[in-house]
Image (cartoon, helix red, strand yellow):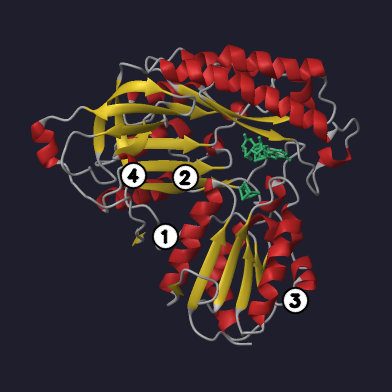
Amino acid sequence: MALLDKTFYIETFGCQMNVHDSEKVIGTLVHEGYRQVETEIEAALILYNTCSIRDKAEQKVFNRLNDYKALHKKGKRFAVLGCVAQQEGEKIFERAPYVSLVSGSASYRKLPEMLAQLEAGEERITGLDDRQTDETFETEFTARSNRHRGYITIIEGCDKFCAYCVVPYTRGKERSRTSHSVLAEARRMADAGYTDIQLLGQNVNSYKDPSGKMSFAELLAAVGQVAGIRRVRFTTSHPRDFTRDIVEAIDAQPTLCDHVHLPVQSGSSHVLKRMQREYTREWYLERIAWIQAARRPISLTTDIIVGFPGETDEDFEQTITLLAQVQYDAVFAFKYSPRPNTPAISMEDSIPEEIKTQRLQILLDRQREIQRKNYCRHIGEIVEVMVEGHNTARGQVFGRSSQNKVVNFTVDAPILPAPGNYLNVRITQAFPNSLLGEAVVSGREAAQMHLSIQDASIEISIV
Ligand code: SAH
Ligand code: SF4
Ligand code: F3S
């Protein structure tokens, strides 16, 4: 069945890398003459960018595809992209025969060819990678959905093979872009008015410049020096590749944000060993000590898995003591979820669901108290906030600090500042997940500010 017209609808799940991949896929489609529409009903081509990190991801995808069955009768075509596409491969055609295209992220470079096949009426088009490719998905046609803050992927894939994780199987091997290409993209973004750049990678600090010119810390500093860029973030850092020069770069370059996300997964060296994380609690805490010794206060956040096979009460207690020791500003905690193809799926001593739930609750309660105290320390401080939008009902503006904390604030001005403005805000109140304050704006600043009465607009700009 050939395509009825060149309209498409895309739905995206998963991490920031997937969100950004979708921006690049959209840009590529638009460049190939397609037009994005807001609903499945209006679209001739429906793309579904999937995530497989936890739970019964594949089942959810098949359930959703089942919903699409009826639409197929109306002549629509379907593409499954992302991590479930790579994981399930051609099985998707068997269980959902109305799908025409299945592609993992490591094959997106071939999208224009795959689209041509689709337009020619081919029924089973695949872009599947078995950890062979050295290619990265680079395109000038990225449809970024925010006009001030944007992602740049600097490294794709993962070679770490943690025992619980699907990513090495779904995203292919680790491959980096050249520092030249990353910096060229950062400059293009700055020229288009972006001020906030987030460098992305499954393990962003495992970056290895194929041209051998720059280390990760040097690339960070160089992006931070691009004229017009005011904020640079990077995520996710892996403790194994976290070097001291990253902290030195943050200290030296004010545009590098005061925030490091450093997933620990467990506070117990015994569990870390079973997880194949290849570091111990002590080794991790040494990196934390470097970060905490920086000249600027750097906010720390982490990911934790509770209920990994064999995790004893004592092991879990060590995760709780680690939280107390590090005093994170945010923790993303998950119950261990067995995943296909991973070694942990066949490990003994699995933890009953109710124990996982209990441990997760204990952890979240403890962490909430830590955050309550951490956030209170900001009361009275003046922090710089980049405006993201307005809460018109409350007459408030919201945005984020360099530490990535959400700040809601009032502005004593007839019109609220538009998204993308940077304002100094005096913090008056604190909650476990956000700060409240009032803008400190002089009359002159207010006059220079780009003002708007609209809420944060979602506009697409191709950079
Ligand atoms: N590369 C990053 C993490 C990427 S995956 C790192 O190694 O730190 C994002 C998070 O999902 C992980 O940090 C982990 O906490 C969680 N996760 C991954 N696989 C999981 C699984 N099978 N069950 C529960 N959580 C999982
Ligand atoms: Fe998954 Fe580990 Fe790779 Fe992170 S480092 S993506 S947890 S395998
Ligand atoms: Fe999900 Fe794949 Fe990202 S499994 S978290 S979309 S790397």
Q: Earlier in the sequence, mark 2 or mark 4?
A: 2
Q: Amino acid at mark 2?
A: Ser
Between marks 2 and 3 in the image, the one whose residue lies nearer the viewer: 3
Q: Is residue 193 left or right of residue 42?
A: left
Q: Amino acid at mark 1?
A: Thr
Mark 1 and mark 3 in contact? Answer it, CB < 8 Å.
no
Q: CA distance from mark 2 to mark 3?
A: 44 Å
Between marks 1 and 2 in the image, the one whose residue lies nearer the viewer: 1
The furthest residue to the front:
393
Q: Which residue is mark 4?
A: 393
Q: Is residue 372 left or right of residue 424?
A: right
Q: Amino acid at mark 3?
A: Pro
Q: CA distance from mark 4 to mark 3?
A: 47 Å
Q: Earlier in the sequence, mark 1 or mark 3?
A: 3
Q: Looking at the image, can residue 146 be seen?
A: yes
The furthest residue to the right:
348
Q: Is residue 263 above or below residue 281?
A: below
Q: Is residue 104 above or below residue 401?
A: below
Q: CA distance from mark 2 to mark 4?
A: 52 Å
Q: Quadrant of residue 129?
A: bottom right
Mark 4 and mark 1 in contact? Answer it, CB < 8 Å.
no
Q: Residues within 10 Å of mark 2 (few under 14, many from 20)?
A: few
Q: Secondary structure at mark 1?
A: loop
Quadrant of the image for the C terminus? bottom left
Q: Secondary structure at mark 2?
A: loop
Q: Earlier in the sequence, mark 4 or mark 3?
A: 3
Q: Position of residue 414 (x, y in %)?
A: 15, 42
The residue at 68%/61% (across/down) is: 85
